[in-house]
Image (cartoon, coloured by chain):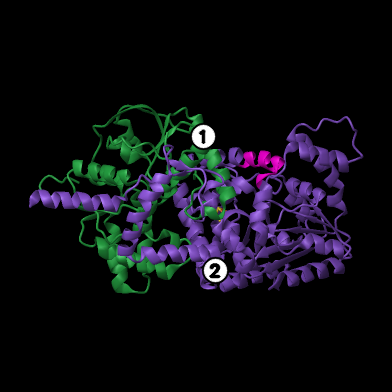
Chain colours: A green, B purple
Amino acid sequence: MTQAASPAPRVGLFVTCLVDLFRPSVGFAAVKLMEDAGCVVDAPAAQTCCGQPAYNSGDRDDTRAIAEATIEAFEEFDYVVAPSGSCAGMLKKHYPGLFKGDEAWEARARTFSDKVHELISFLTDVLGVTQVPAKAAGKVTYHDSCSGLRELGIHDQPRKLVASVKGLKLTEMADADVCCGFGGTFCVKYGEISNAIVEEKAANIAGSGADMLLASDLGCLMNMAGKLKRQGSNIEVRHVAEVLAGMTDQPPIGGK
Amino acid sequence: MQITSPTFKANAHEALHDAQLQRALGNVRSGFIGKRAKAVDALPEFEELRDNAKTIKDHVLEHLDIYLEAYEKKVEDAGGKVHWAESAAEARGIILDICRMNNARTVTKGKSMLTEEIELNDFLEASGIQPIETDLGEYIIQLRGEHPSHIIAPAVHLNKDQVESDFRRVHTDFPKDRDLTEPEQLLSEARQVLRQKYFDADVGITGANFLIAETGTSIIVTNEGNGDLTQTLPRVHIVLASIEKVVPTLDDAAQILRVLARSATGQEMSVYTTLSTGPKRASDPDGPDEYHVILLDNGRSSMLGTEFQDALRCIRCGACMNHCPVYHAVGGHAYGWVYPGPIGAVLTPSLVGVDKAGHLPNASTFCGRCEAVCPMRIPLPKMMRHWREKEFERGLNPAVARYGLKFWLWFAKRPRLYRLTTYLAMPVMGLFGGRKRRYRFLPFAGGWVRHRDLPAPEGRTFMQQWRDRDTLKQDAHA
Ligand code: SF4
């Protein structure tokens, strides 16, 4: 898709609650990447959370209420972009189903869902970005978060852009596509099982020989960073957008 | 089998600290996943075959009554007898009647999860009839007084050295200094023990992978050939099958077989695919004198027409558990009933009640790997979510989780208050993160910080900073 003659696309940034609260710099990195690619970006103030905590706890009514508010908040934009495969997956794949039987809302939800994209695949697949001007140093490994991979088919896109960062070398870990054990509230409800899964993941990350871990979902990143730091590892953990935007002034997730 | 699903958390805790089990579980990851991937990659039309398989079963489930009746007629035409059983107790009663009528003392069994579901072994023993498992894995766990921990590899929770010591303990007729280090040696010893038992058995009981409506045939697939001996040598053959196993034609079964073994073990086909239709005919060299089929419902028909109907497409290949990170961590016994893993998390609440099995659909990260590999395209995570919805409606989920969620939602539905509160709270939380930018301890976050540090927030929220940027921009324009 070429944007040459058409006016700059207007993008509503769905910042996600975790990025809003824990790591705003990911939001600003997302804004920079999209502005550099010619978008006009805004983050409407009426957004909060995509509703997954309620949805995955079986609370459909509250999920629907949140979905309605989110759809209304973003209706004016050409695109809705989230720096998270999990939240983008929720908005794109699960919102329409919440309104089954309510034709008017279901149609609205479909129009909305069609505009939703995860950040990195939005850059590559919609805006046609093939490289970024950022520079960095060292070996990185990339973890595929589950929803991005299996609901949205994101696998090659982040790797392609990471490979374009001067000075970075991508080294794959074993089982990069296996869950890190986060799973939203799962990680506290079934903490011991979650721990066993993230221990396995941490071993694979360490085994890759990388000195930096990247992924596109803050929940997974906080889980993996938390485990690595508890183990005393000095592997840096960052959201892939920070590196692609060349915005790595903030200390890494969970510190050095 | 006693249901221990209500204590799933405690079961999981035990499993995670069981060194033998953890060692054995490594085999699930290394044994199944790569082989399936290779088999799938080698067959370009695999995805299409999955679609076909799904379509066949969906069609059957829409017309189940018609196909079951057609099947029954064909079985009876071939000289067999069909028995309908609504419950486990009914199925057990029918089996016992057939055994008694034939003065059976021993019964050989092919691998069948359905006989686990109806707790047949304990029942037969209590009735004075000796059941003998003939599948190697089933034989091993019968020796140990255990239950299967996997639907196609019942003894996958054991290591070879454990099996060796069981054989040395029980098979006392063999020389003490024999070599049992290779799996083939274990298999051949079990075969020697079992050989005579096949001939002595009065009744052979097998499950069924498929029932064919057009011919009245039942099909089983095995890798050891034990199923063949179980159903041809005794005088009486009983097939125990659940109602959703029926498919219209042999051709339909052949299509589904193409995805079954590939998904299960990465084989193109299982070693033995055995078809049986009715008792021995005059011209047959061997076969049973009596052929019975028991069609068991046991809760399945109540899934028809509900959001759980799709789960009845399951062909019990085991791929979902082979690819499940939770199964890898805790193994099959922790799930606490017959069917473990993702399909167990959907079926168990349906068949024994969500009040007992409520943990299972919750103990999932929704990573979606099960659905990605399920040959029958069963939307397992979606169905687990449906169970969570039912639990939520009935207030079955734990109070702490409910109130925590309500608290969060109250804010999430009020963007202004949410903003105000987070503007104030996050910078303070950020400060507590200290120079290290993480917490080792944090009140109300025990579930997290027990196992890992919690990365600290950077400070001011994104939305707060964004508002500043907007204001700056507007000032610049003014
Ligand atoms: S749910 Fe699917 S993957 Fe799991 S056992 Fe059944 S058919 Fe196989």
Q: Is residue B19 magenta?
A: yes
Quadrant location of residue B125?
Answer: bottom right
Chain of the residue displaying label 2: B
| Screen quadrant of the C terminus of chain A | top left
Residue at mark 2: B391
| Secondary structure at numbered mark 1 | helix
Is residue B440 part of the magenta span, yes or no? Answer: no
Amino acid type of disc 2?
Glu
* Residue B245 visible, this orientation: no
* Residue segment shown in magenta: B16-28
Q: In which quarter of the image is residue B185?
A: top right
Dividing the picture into quadrants, the one containing residue A155 is: top left
* Subunit that carries the residue with mark 1: A
* Whole-percent x, y for residue B414 in the image: 33, 66
Up-down relation of residue B203 to residue B150 (above or below): below
Q: In the depicted view, which residue is nearer to us: A112 or A203?
A: A203
Q: Residue A204 carries which label?
A: 1
